[in-house]
Amino acid sequence: MYETAGKLKWIGTTQSFASGFTKREFVVTTTRDKYPQDLKFEVVKDKCSSLDRFEIDQEVQVNFDIRGNEYNGKYYVNLACWKLQAADGAPPTPRAKAKSNTPDAEPDLADLRNDDDFDDDPPF
Protein backbone atom coordinates (compact mmCIF):
# COMPACT_ATOMS: atom_id res chain seq x y z
CA MET A 1 0.00 0.00 0.00
CA TYR A 2 1.31 3.40 -1.02
CA GLU A 3 0.00 6.92 -0.53
CA THR A 4 0.61 10.34 -2.06
CA ALA A 5 -1.09 13.70 -2.21
CA GLY A 6 -1.30 16.53 -4.71
CA LYS A 7 -3.50 18.43 -7.14
CA LEU A 8 -5.62 16.76 -9.80
CA LYS A 9 -4.16 17.81 -13.15
CA TRP A 10 -6.15 15.69 -15.63
CA ILE A 11 -9.08 13.26 -15.58
CA GLY A 12 -9.58 11.02 -18.59
CA THR A 13 -12.74 9.44 -19.92
CA THR A 14 -13.75 5.87 -19.17
CA GLN A 15 -12.21 3.37 -21.59
CA SER A 16 -14.17 0.20 -22.35
CA PHE A 17 -12.68 -2.93 -23.87
CA ALA A 18 -14.27 -5.84 -25.76
CA SER A 19 -13.79 -8.12 -22.75
CA GLY A 20 -16.09 -5.88 -20.68
CA PHE A 21 -13.18 -4.43 -18.71
CA THR A 22 -13.29 -0.66 -18.05
CA LYS A 23 -10.64 1.71 -16.75
CA ARG A 24 -10.17 5.43 -16.28
CA GLU A 25 -6.92 7.32 -15.85
CA PHE A 26 -6.10 10.52 -14.01
CA VAL A 27 -2.97 12.55 -13.23
CA VAL A 28 -1.99 14.04 -9.89
CA THR A 29 0.83 16.58 -9.54
CA THR A 30 2.58 16.01 -6.23
CA THR A 31 2.85 19.18 -4.16
CA ARG A 32 4.85 18.05 -1.12
CA ASP A 33 8.00 17.19 -3.08
CA LYS A 34 10.91 19.53 -3.74
CA TYR A 35 10.49 18.72 -7.43
CA PRO A 36 6.77 18.12 -8.15
CA GLN A 37 5.98 15.05 -10.26
CA ASP A 38 3.02 14.25 -12.53
CA LEU A 39 1.86 10.74 -11.60
CA LYS A 40 -0.67 8.85 -13.73
CA PHE A 41 -3.04 6.56 -11.85
CA GLU A 42 -5.85 4.32 -13.02
CA VAL A 43 -9.10 3.07 -11.51
CA VAL A 44 -10.96 0.07 -12.87
CA LYS A 45 -14.48 -1.30 -13.15
CA ASP A 46 -17.02 0.25 -10.75
CA LYS A 47 -14.52 2.82 -9.41
CA CYS A 48 -14.45 4.68 -12.75
CA SER A 49 -17.49 6.76 -11.83
CA SER A 50 -15.93 7.83 -8.52
CA LEU A 51 -13.78 10.34 -10.44
CA ASP A 52 -16.91 12.26 -11.46
CA ARG A 53 -17.03 13.85 -8.01
CA PHE A 54 -13.64 15.55 -8.33
CA GLU A 55 -12.49 18.72 -10.12
CA ILE A 56 -9.24 19.72 -11.80
CA ASP A 57 -6.86 21.53 -9.37
CA GLN A 58 -8.58 19.94 -6.37
CA GLU A 59 -6.20 18.76 -3.63
CA VAL A 60 -6.52 14.98 -3.22
CA GLN A 61 -5.00 12.08 -1.36
CA VAL A 62 -4.44 8.87 -3.33
CA ASN A 63 -4.00 5.37 -1.90
CA PHE A 64 -2.66 2.96 -4.50
CA ASP A 65 -0.81 -0.25 -5.29
CA ILE A 66 1.96 -0.75 -7.82
CA ARG A 67 1.11 -3.35 -10.46
CA GLY A 68 3.56 -4.73 -12.98
CA ASN A 69 3.25 -7.13 -15.89
CA GLU A 70 5.07 -8.41 -18.97
CA TYR A 71 3.55 -8.50 -22.45
CA ASN A 72 5.47 -9.63 -25.55
CA GLY A 73 8.82 -9.09 -23.85
CA LYS A 74 8.00 -5.58 -22.63
CA TYR A 75 7.40 -4.68 -19.01
CA TYR A 76 4.69 -2.29 -17.80
CA VAL A 77 3.99 -0.64 -14.46
CA ASN A 78 0.62 0.77 -13.41
CA LEU A 79 -0.32 2.74 -10.32
CA ALA A 80 -3.67 1.20 -9.38
CA CYS A 81 -5.71 3.60 -7.22
CA TRP A 82 -8.03 1.94 -4.74
CA LYS A 83 -8.99 5.02 -2.71
CA LEU A 84 -9.23 8.67 -3.71
CA GLN A 85 -10.39 11.38 -1.36
CA ALA A 86 -10.20 15.14 -0.93
CA ALA A 87 -6.98 16.09 0.87
CA ASP A 88 -8.83 17.79 3.71
CA GLY A 89 -10.92 14.66 4.31
CA ALA A 90 -14.13 16.41 3.28
CA PRO A 91 -16.38 14.61 0.85
CA PRO A 92 -15.72 15.71 -2.74
CA THR A 93 -18.11 18.10 -4.40
CA PRO A 94 -19.94 16.91 -7.51
CA ARG A 95 -18.30 18.08 -10.71
CA ALA A 96 -20.20 20.18 -13.19
CA LYS A 97 -21.39 18.02 -16.05
CA ALA A 98 -18.70 17.89 -18.69
CA LYS A 99 -19.53 17.37 -22.31
CA SER A 100 -18.35 13.82 -22.83
CA ASN A 101 -19.63 10.42 -23.76
CA THR A 102 -19.26 9.01 -20.25
CA PRO A 103 -22.41 8.00 -18.39
CA ASP A 104 -23.60 10.30 -15.61
CA ALA A 105 -22.65 9.26 -12.11
CA GLU A 106 -25.36 8.09 -9.76
CA PRO A 107 -26.49 10.99 -7.55
CA ASP A 108 -25.27 11.06 -3.99
CA LEU A 109 -27.80 10.83 -1.14
CA ALA A 110 -26.90 14.39 -0.09
CA ASP A 111 -27.86 15.61 -3.60
CA LEU A 112 -31.29 14.02 -3.33
CA ARG A 113 -32.14 15.14 0.18
CA ASN A 114 -33.36 18.63 0.95
CA ASP A 115 -33.99 19.36 4.62
CA ASP A 116 -37.03 21.49 3.68
CA ASP A 117 -38.69 18.38 2.16
CA PHE A 118 -39.21 16.76 5.57
CA ASP A 119 -41.88 17.60 8.10
CA ASP A 120 -43.78 15.76 10.79
CA ASP A 121 -47.14 15.80 9.02
CA PRO A 122 -48.40 12.43 7.75
CA PRO A 123 -48.75 12.23 3.95
CA PHE A 124 -52.53 11.50 4.06
Image (cartoon, rainbow, N blue to C red):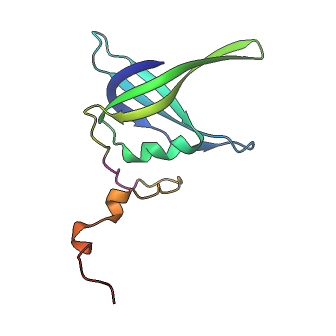
Query: Which residue is at a point 37% across and 58% down the rendered structure image?
Result: 109
Residue 67 falls left or right of residue 20: left
**Residue 3 lies in what quarter of the image?**
top left
Which residue extends farthest right? 72
Closer to us: 53 or 124 = 124
Main SS, magenta region, reads: loop
Q: Position of residue 79 (x, y in %)?
A: 52, 22
Closer to us: 80 or 98 = 80
**Residue 39 lies in what quarter of the image?**
top left
Q: Is residue 30 magenta?
A: no
Residue 47 falls left or right of residue 98: right
Q: Position of residue 85 (x, y in %)?
A: 36, 35
Residue 95 falls left or right of residue 65: left
Which residue extends farthest top? 34
Query: Which residue is at a point 41% across and 34% down the rendered structure image?
Result: 84
Q: Position of residue 36 (x, y in %)?
A: 32, 16
Residues shaded magenta: 93-97
